[in-house]
Amino acid sequence: MPPDETGDRARLVGTNHVAMEVGDVEAALEFYRGLFAFELRGRLEGKAFVDMGDQFVALVETDGAEERDALDRDAGERDALDRDARDRRDADDARHIGFVVDAADLVSARLEALDVERLDTSGLDFHDPWGNRIQVVEYGAVQFTKTAHILKGMGLGTLEKTDSALEELAEKGMGPPASDDRSTDGDP
């Protein structure tokens, strides 16, 4: 769809961050450090900010996340919930956060090593201990693109896109210059 030509609305450019509810920030950091390599951007009481270069994920401690965690541990209690609460919980099965990684096979191996159950999908999906559904995709296979200087600053300057991802970008008029093979932004 073309951008709004009236100029009365801002265009969505990207995502700065996503906030995920967790029951315990320290436990969440331990869980995610078991799967991914990352640095913290900062901390506040009940919050931790996981750095992803020019973006971040906020892990936010909430009572509601603790309740979902308890329900996941004891599915029998689910029946005691009122209908609205069950419907909200079931709706969360489709909502998810998509993390982009440099090597999805490493995440798959870590999930297995940590005995984290994968969901029955064609992709790499799982729930964290607080019920957040996570989908992991490899950088090269998706349209999402970081500029070369951001990748270089993250120590990921050698990441490349697949032909399929480059074709999808080119169809939108967002492909890399013809001089670039599989990279998305050339050298900084």
Image: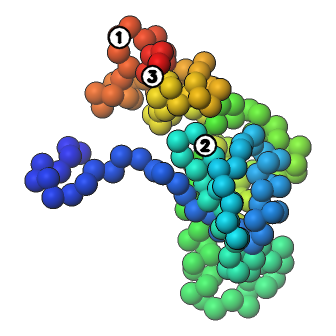
Residue 144 coordinates in the image, percent (x, y): 47, 36
Asked if the residues shown at circle 3 and circle 2 are in contact, with their CB atoms under 8 angstroms apart, the answer is no
- At x 70%, y 80%, the residue is 63
- At x 63%, y 46%, the residue is 51
Above or below for 132 versus 139: below
Residue 52 coordinates in the image, percent (x, y): 61, 43
Q: Please tell me in which quadrant of the rendered image residue 176 appears.
A: top left
Disc 1, SS: loop
What amino acid is labelled 3 in the image? Thr
Q: Residues within 10 Å of mark 3 (few under 14, many from 20)?
A: many
Q: Is residue 73 shown to the viewer in this render?
A: yes
Q: Which residue is mark 3?
A: 184
Q: Which residue is mark 2?
A: 52
Closer to the camera, 124 or 143? 143
What amino acid is labelled 2 in the image? Met
Q: Please tell me in which quadrant of the rendered image residue 28 appears.
A: bottom right
Q: Is residue 132 shown to the viewer in this render?
A: no
Q: Residue furthest left?
A: 6
- C-alpha gap between disc 1 and disc 3: 10 Å
Q: Nearer the viewer, mark 3 or mark 2?
A: 2
Disc 3, SS: loop
- C-alpha gap between disc 1 and disc 2: 28 Å
Q: Which residue is mark 1?
A: 178
Closer to the camera, 124 or 160? 160
What amino acid is labelled 1 in the image? Ala
Q: Please tell me in which quadrant of the rendered image residue 139 appears.
A: top right
- At x 83%, y 55%, the residue is 30
